[in-house]
Amino acid sequence: MGLNKEAIKIGFAYVGIVVGAGFSTGQEVMQFFTPFGLWSYIGVLISGFILGFIGRQVAKIGTAFEATNHESTLQYIFGEKFSKVFDYILVFFLFGIAVTMIAGSGSTFNQSFHIPTWLGALIMTIIIYLTLLLDFNKIVRALGIVTPFLIIMVILIAVYYLFTGDISISQVNSTVPETSAWKGIFWGLVYGGLAFAVGFSTVVAIGGDASKRRVSGAGAMFGGVIYTILLALINFSLQTEYPKIKNADIPTLDLANSINPWIGLVLTIIMLAVMYNTILGLCYSFAARFTEPYSKKYHIFIIIMMIAAYVLSFVGFADLINVLYKFMGVVGMFIVVAVLIKYFKRKNDDKKHIA
């Protein structure tokens, strides 16, 4: 697999991006997996395959092109004409998700620490801006730092509810509202597409910065495996307490607070760090698409971008989150299918393929 120190760093950075799109709060897991009972684990595996194998292919393409943004990778996958369409859709919707996350960070600061929402969002915006001034290696390191802590916290919560949860595995299907294999598979595909679309631009740039294709590919695959395990564990924890937390805004925080308020506080800090990861990855990708990183234009651009993101976070942008996420899931699936077609076509032609 080629799993060295560099690949592990890439894997943690990749997970750090994709789990920030609401994954760590449990809200998306609740919408896309938990209600479908044990069938949801088929969706978990499908979603994990998309993040792992397709992420591996895209990271390797990024390395081959020494990409700093997703433009060359999209051209390789879709060709000149169609790549432009996906380029602009991705760029602006990913920026929209970053804005939504800034709004979410303001709410989290407010709920947990009683800091005014506007101030919480401003604190996050300033921290993101300062990190964007660092070189890319330091950004990748920042993206990966929180991932091990999230893994420990999710395992702790899952193990606790394995032994103390109100609902056993055998009772899950009779407790949740929709035990449907088709829904489990369908929403697993959509969520895999969403998470992949969120991580796409960043994994291309991380791949572009890696030393070898084998290393970037192994790192993305490792990230996909970690993501799958975390997703399954969060889903399991939510199912064991489903009647209690089905209407909660931040279900994982409810679970953590039920164990101990201190664990809830630690999880809050980790969730804010995960939101920071996602906003940072998306904003770097957005800036790198329109400017040469660290040029004079880049420095001007990130100031304008962060002011715009902060202002837009007050426009009720969060109300669009359901539509935005589902649309991004469909866009992500188009890219996934295109990557698979490219992969099998190059393999059948027996060409030395990039990925």
Image: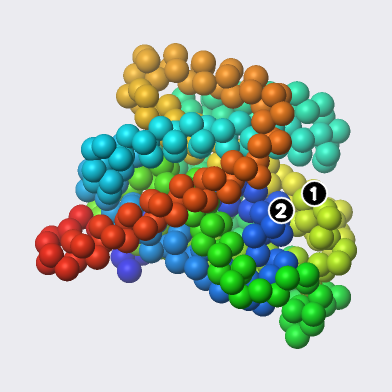
Q: In the picture shown, does residue 159 fall above or below 208?
A: below
According to the picture, the residue beneath numbered tag 1 turns out to be 249
The residue positioned 73% from the left and 70% from the top of the image is 178
The residue positioned 13% from the left and 60% from the top of the image is 352
> Image quadrant of residue 87?
top left
Mark 1: few/some/many CA within 10 Å (<14, 14-19, 20+)? few
Q: Quadrant of the N terminus?
A: bottom left
Q: Secondary structure at mark 1?
A: loop
Mark 2: few/some/many CA within 10 Å (<14, 14-19, 20+)? many
From the viewer's perspective, is 76 left or right of 293? left
The residue positioned 44% from the left and 36% from the top of the image is 89
Q: x and y percent of residue 14 in the render? A: 47, 51
Q: Amino acid at mark 1?
A: Asp
**Relative to the observer, which residue lies in front, 225 or 147?**
225
Q: How many marks?
A: 2
> Image quadrant of residue 354?
bottom left
Q: Quadrant of the C terminus?
A: bottom left
Q: Amino acid at mark 2?
A: Gln
Spatial CA distance of label 2 from label 1 is 7 Å
According to the picture, the residue beneath numbered tag 2 turns out to be 27
Please tell me the numbered disc located at residue 258. Answer: none
Q: x and y percent of residue 314 in the render? A: 71, 24
